[in-house]
Amino acid sequence: MERKESGNDSDAFGFKFLTKTPYASPSWASHLTPIPSHVFSLGHFPTPIHKWNLPNLPHNTEVWLKRDDLSGMQLSGNKVRKLEFLMADAVAQGADCIITIGGIQSNHCRAAAVAAKYLNLD
């Protein structure tokens, strides 16, 4: 099941929302199995890394933050990274719905519901 570009403004920046793309694992993970064959583009990656200026840090100490809250998928932060793989696998297996579980107010469950809706999965 191939997904088409959404036609939104993000395409102008090289981001193709909901596009199924082949996955090439990094060399350090090439021995793992199974290796996914595809992912769905659900977020804006790579996300930036920002230096966090905190008072009273020990000398020569720096704190840097990976800003996955800027991935572009509401309420999900880093959850969108794993969902790109999980949703691609579900679609590849012909799923028409997904089932997940989490605690009350689970960000993972919310993000999974949003991703499923984008991909026309119940």
Image (tube, helix red, strand yellow):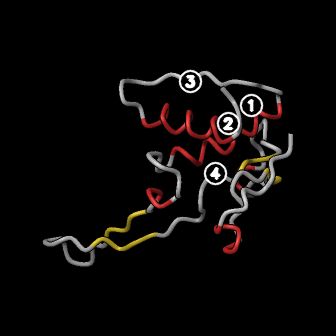
Dot 3 alpha-carbon crowd within 10 angstroms: few under 14, some 14 to 19, many 20 or more: few
Dot 4 alpha-carbon crowd within 10 angstroms: few under 14, some 14 to 19, many 20 or more: many
Percent from the top left, x then y, of residue 15? 68, 65
Q: What amino acid type should be assigned to the residue bearing mark 1? A: Ala
Q: What amino acid type should be assigned to the residue bearing mark 2? A: Leu
Percent from the top left, x then y, of residue 23? 79, 52
Location of residue 85 (image quadrant): top right
Q: Which residue is mark 1?
A: 90
Q: What amino acid type should be assigned to the residue bearing mark 4? A: Leu
Q: Which mark is residue 12?
A: none
Give the Cα distance between marks 1 and 4: 14 Å
Disc 4 is placed on an element classified as loop
Q: Nearer the viewer, mark 4 or mark 2?
A: 4
Q: What amino acid type should be assigned to the residue bearing mark 3? A: Thr
Disc 1 is placed on an element classified as helix
Question: Does 36 sit left or right of 101 as displayed?
Answer: right
When the figure is inspected, residue 75 is found, relative to residue 5, above or below; the finding is: above
Give the Cα distance between marks 2 and 3: 11 Å
- Which badge, 3 or 1, is on the more N-terminal residue? 1
| Mark 1 in CB contact with mark 2 (< 8 angstroms) | yes
Q: Which residue is mark 2?
A: 86
Q: Which residue is mark 4?
A: 42
Q: Which mark is residue 100?
A: 3
